[in-house]
Image: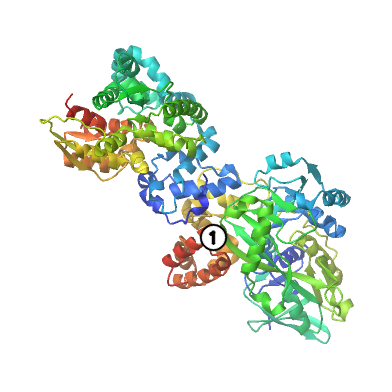
């Protein structure tokens, strides 16, 4: 929906834009969004390549008192007018590789031990930095020897009479099956069996931000078809990544034009679903008596956009033994694949510095957050381990 | 009394006066233009910004249509930077039928206008915003022209060829010696002499002439228009029927302009023209027939201008009215030598009007200089338009001023002051230097400051600070003057998002409204 005319030019969005603060080349959400759109409607030549700096964090949309879809407008403009701005040559190869999480994960997983070692070698890092423009400070999340789906196939889920579906996403499947395993453990303990979707593709968020919208749309259509089947079977589709969730719920219709209103409410974060079931008494979990953990919660930008951080926070508060501090909402700066790019590394770290400082000051055992890329960024920048709230819960319950 | 005697004094700084002063200057006449306000203050700044192909007049006024298409082609060349070659569509709705269309195409072709019937489906593909109920469409070479830029370009060229421009100075009377008009008396008390005085003051011409004993029957015809906040269509959209109210939508720069109405009004009201709520209602109702999405598109303001229609027979009752060009040689018509009136006509035909007037002036002054205005490009349109390149903040200025951006210092003044319209300090400094602006309303006409969605709510204080700094005047006074003027155009359309904007404007500028 293009509602640029509702903009009153109050500039609240400009005030909350994390990129604005660190990068004078970025025109800011108001100018890149509704102001720029008026000019682009006259002549696409008014497209400003500086729009590539938009993190798509949607903080502008959260701030807007007029409900202008500023971030969507910028994303849509990048897709519509910015295709020629796609990087070419080695940087193009890099963007393609970063965007193709599904494909690259499938290729890398079988060789996980080798790939993980190689990606950490200094000479490899410096070649990637110099030639491909992947910043040398970054470490790719390790690939798992066993994919989540292969583990899951060996799990017996037949003894249940109630089921939920699980959209695991690329990170759980290729890099971090433990998170998915923890969720299955919790759900089974709660008396629910787990199904995977008939067909699951990467949600497409990295494709969209790297200029491959058509591929993202194709994958989105596949996911929605499977989500519809789950909905027909009366199963909610649970997720463990805030960004995948946000993409499938909101970016599909607003940016890619994929209609999902019939199943949108069916897609939700596992933390929200669990919180609602536990607080209504439908699910009863047994907690360990000896569990103690000092945790700070970081609200990922897309969590804030959905307004769902409340569920994760309240779920953590329900766990006996958890000492929870909720951090001020600040962007961590990585914005998915954005922060991996050498040209963006400096912006990423500057944007995240307030958050890193807050975390260091609270000095927790763990940081909890619902977004995997926030996790990579916080672990790299603070050295403090980061968990998904689901992992905290899994550790706290008695099986 | 001023020592200097000009060959020609032109009264009125609208498009007609501007085109005439340019023509005179190019022909080597020493010329002065006097304007009581700013350039483009009257009807020239309160119109549709439509470069007619002549199609609208083809059925009823063959001569007018032929003039339009000739001038349309000339302006595309000499004023390439002011003209956007949008092309136009005449659409037929079921209630219009197709009978008019057949005759319309025939008449267009007779007048030399390329009118091509196209399939409704093809028309909707070209311009998806138009009413999907259309049963027919005709493509014509209409275009969008920025009246402010067009008039400015004429003024700049005249100055660069030696003409003097005297703004914010009214002509209080025509000075006569015997029957002959020998000059003008100004509001500053000066008498300035000239061999010929040309009245090009639109509807205000009649009053000036009358004081000199010359009667010109004029009939002010008010036209109201509304501005939508952004482009809903990129072509000029007309109704293919007998010309009526509110049946033209023009893409003007980054907005859409819908008009117009046509109502006879008393001369006394011409100094304070504004659109009424009734006119806005009428415009909206009809506009939705052209482009349905207008029903929910934000209107940012409404305004009105006055067409200087001339009654051919001053004793008549006003039925015999011409919309054509009127050139009056008062020496032969009224026995008052030294005085010429050029009026009527349209924005599209102003250059031709100037040529006709200047031909007459030259004949009287014994000059054989030939008219060159049809072949010489105007400032801003000379040579190739600079290519869009970074910095991005130059692009809007290139769109407005074309090759004139070479005179703006973006290195030093690249910061954007007016955000909706991307106006930089460099552009403000250029406008102050070239056009002698006194306040923000003047600045608006020569840039696009405050013409955007927020109508100045957000950045007007920044603008005032910059302008006050350049002019060494009070910033507060600048804001006050500007806000009053903006308010006038917003009041007839105060609902929905414009009402919200107005509340925001009031809160951020509460002392000035």
Q: Position of residue B11 (x, y in %)?
A: 72, 73
Horizontal relation, residue A334 to residue B97: left or right: left
Q: Position of residue B450 (x, y in %)?
A: 53, 61
Q: Is residue B8 visible?
A: no
Among the 4 quarters of the image, the one containing residue B127: top right
- Write down the residue under mark 1: B449
Q: Position of residue B78 (x, y in %)?
A: 73, 53
Residue that sits furthest to the left in the current view? A290
Q: Residue at x 58, y 67 (%)?
A: B492
Query: Split into 4 quadrants, where in the image is the N terminus of chain B?
Result: bottom right
Horizontal relation, residue B334 to residue B169: left or right: right
Q: Residue at x 80, y 64 (%)?
A: B353
Is B25 above or below relative to B387?
below
Is A209 above or below relative to B84?
above
Among the 4 quarters of the image, the one containing residue B224: bottom right
Q: Position of residue B56 (x, y in %)?
A: 79, 56
Nearest the eye: B333 or A357: A357
Is B387 above or below relative to B78?
above
Is A3 above or below relative to B487?
above
Horizontal relation, residue A313 to residue B310: left or right: left
Q: Secondary structure at mark 1?
A: loop
Nearest the eye: B20 or A240: A240
């Amino acid at each position: 929906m293009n509602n640029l005319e509702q903009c009153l030019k109050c500039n609240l969005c400009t005030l909350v834009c994390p990129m604005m603060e660190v990068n004078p080349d970025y025109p800011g959400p108001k100018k890149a969004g509704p102001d720029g759109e008026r000019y682009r409607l006259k002549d696409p030549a008014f497209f400003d390549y500086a729009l590539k700096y938009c993190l798509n964090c949607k903080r502008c949309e959260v701030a807007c008192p007029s409900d202008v879809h500023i971030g969507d407008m910028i994303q849509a403009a990048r897709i519509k007018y910015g295709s020629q701005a796609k990087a070419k040559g080695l940087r193009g190869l890099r963007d393609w590789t970063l965007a193709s999480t599904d494909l690259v994960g499938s290729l890398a997983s079988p060789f996980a031990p080798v790939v993980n070692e190689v990606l950490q070698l200094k000479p490899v890092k410096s070649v990637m930095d110099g030639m491909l423009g992947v910043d040398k400070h970054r470490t790719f999340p390790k690939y798992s020897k066993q994919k989540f789906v292969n583990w899951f196939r060996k799990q017996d889920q037949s003894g249940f009479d109630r089921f939920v579906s699980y959209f695991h996403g690329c990170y759980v499947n290729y890099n971090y099956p433990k998170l998915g395993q923890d969720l299955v453990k919790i759900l089974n303990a709660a008396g629910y069996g787990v199904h995977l979707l008939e067909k699951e593709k990467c949600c497409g968020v990295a494709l969209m931000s790297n200029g491959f919208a058509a591929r993202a749309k194709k994958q989105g259509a596949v996911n929605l078809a499977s989500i519809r089947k789950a909905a027909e079977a009366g199963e909610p589709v649970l997720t463990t990544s805030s960004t995948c969730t946000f993409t499938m719920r909101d970016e599909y219709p607003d940016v890619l034009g994929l209609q999902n209103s019939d199943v949108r409410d069916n897609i939700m974060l596992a933390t929200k679903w669990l919180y609602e079931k536990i607080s209504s008494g439908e699910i009863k979990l047994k907690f360990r008596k000896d569990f103690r953990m000092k945790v700070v919660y970081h609200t990922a930008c897309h969590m804030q956009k959905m307004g769902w951080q409340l569920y994760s926070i309240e779920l953590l508060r329900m766990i006996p033994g958890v000492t929870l501090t909720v951090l001020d909402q600040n962007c961590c700066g990585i914005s998915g694949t954005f922060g991996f790019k050498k040209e963006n590394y400096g912006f990423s770290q500057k944007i995240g510095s307030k958050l890193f400082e807050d975390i260091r000051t609270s000095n927790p055992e763990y940081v909890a957050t619902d977004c995997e890329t926030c996790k990579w960024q916080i672990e790299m920048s603070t050295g403090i381990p980061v968990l998904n709230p689901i992992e905290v819960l899994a550790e706290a319950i008695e099986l | 009394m001023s020592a200097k005697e000009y060959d020609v004094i032109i009264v009125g700084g609208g498009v007609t006066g501007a085109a005439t002063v340019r023509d005179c200057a190019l022909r080597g006449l020493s010329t002065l233009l006097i304007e009581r306000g700013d350039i483009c203050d009257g009807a020239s700044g309160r119109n549709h910004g439509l470069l007619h192909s002549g199609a609208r007049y083809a059925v009823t006024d063959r001569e007018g249509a032929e003039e339009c298409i000739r001038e349309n082609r000339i302006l595309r060349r000499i004023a390439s930077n002011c003209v956007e070659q949008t092309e136009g569509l005449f659409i037929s709705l079921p209630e219009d039928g197709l009978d008019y269309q057949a005759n319309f195409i025939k008449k267009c072709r007779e007048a030399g206008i390329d009118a091509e019937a196209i399939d409704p489906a093809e028309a909707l593909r070209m311009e998806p915003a138009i009413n999907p109920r259309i049963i027919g469409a005709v493509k014509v070479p209409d275009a969008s022209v920025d009246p402010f830029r067009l008039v400015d370009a004429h003024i700049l060229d005249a100055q660069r060829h030696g003409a003097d421009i005297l703004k914010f100075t009214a002509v209080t009377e025509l000075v006569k010696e015997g029957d002959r008009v020998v000059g003008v008396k100004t509001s500053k008390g000066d008498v300035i002499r000239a061999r010929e005085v040309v009245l090009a003051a639109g509807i205000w011409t009649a009053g000036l002439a009358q004081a000199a004993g010359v009667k010109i029957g004029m009939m002010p015809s008010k036209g109201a228009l509304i501005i939508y906040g952004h482009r809903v269509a990129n072509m000029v959209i007309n109704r293919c029927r007998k010309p009526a109210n509110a049946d033209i939508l023009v893409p003007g720069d980054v907005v859409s302009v819908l008009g117009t109405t046509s109502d006879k009004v008393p001369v006394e009201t011409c100094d304070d023209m504004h659109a009424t709520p009734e006119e806005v209602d009428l415009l909206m109702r009809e506009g939705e027939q052209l482009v349905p999405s207008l029903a929910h598109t934000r209107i940012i303001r409404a305004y009105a201008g006055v067409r200087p229609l001339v009654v051919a027979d001053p004793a008549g009752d006003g039925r015999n009215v011409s919309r054509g060009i009127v050139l009056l040689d008062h020496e032969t018509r009224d026995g008052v030598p030294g005085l010429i009136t050029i009026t009527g006509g349209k924005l599209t035909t102003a250059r031709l009007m100037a040529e006709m007037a200047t031909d007459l002036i030259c004949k009287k002054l014994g000059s054989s200089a030939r008219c060159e205005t049809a072949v010489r490009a105007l400032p801003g349109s000379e040579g190739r338009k600079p290519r869009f390149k970074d910095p991005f903040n130059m692009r809007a200025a290139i769109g407005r001023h074309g090759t004139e951006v070479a005179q703006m210092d973006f290195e030093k003044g690249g910061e954007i002051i007016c955000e909706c319209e991307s106006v930089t300090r460099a552009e403000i400094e250029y406008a102050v230097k070239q056009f002698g602006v006194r306040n923000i309303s003047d600045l608006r006409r020569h840039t696009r400051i405050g013409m955007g969605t927020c109508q100045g709510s957000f950045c007007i204080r920044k603008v005032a600070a910059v302008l006050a700094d350049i002019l060494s005047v009070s910033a507060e006074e600048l804001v006050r003057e500007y806000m009053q003027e903006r308010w006038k155009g917003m009041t007839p359309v105060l609902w929905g998002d414009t009402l919200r904007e107005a509340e925001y404007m009031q809160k951020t500028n509460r002392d000035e409204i």
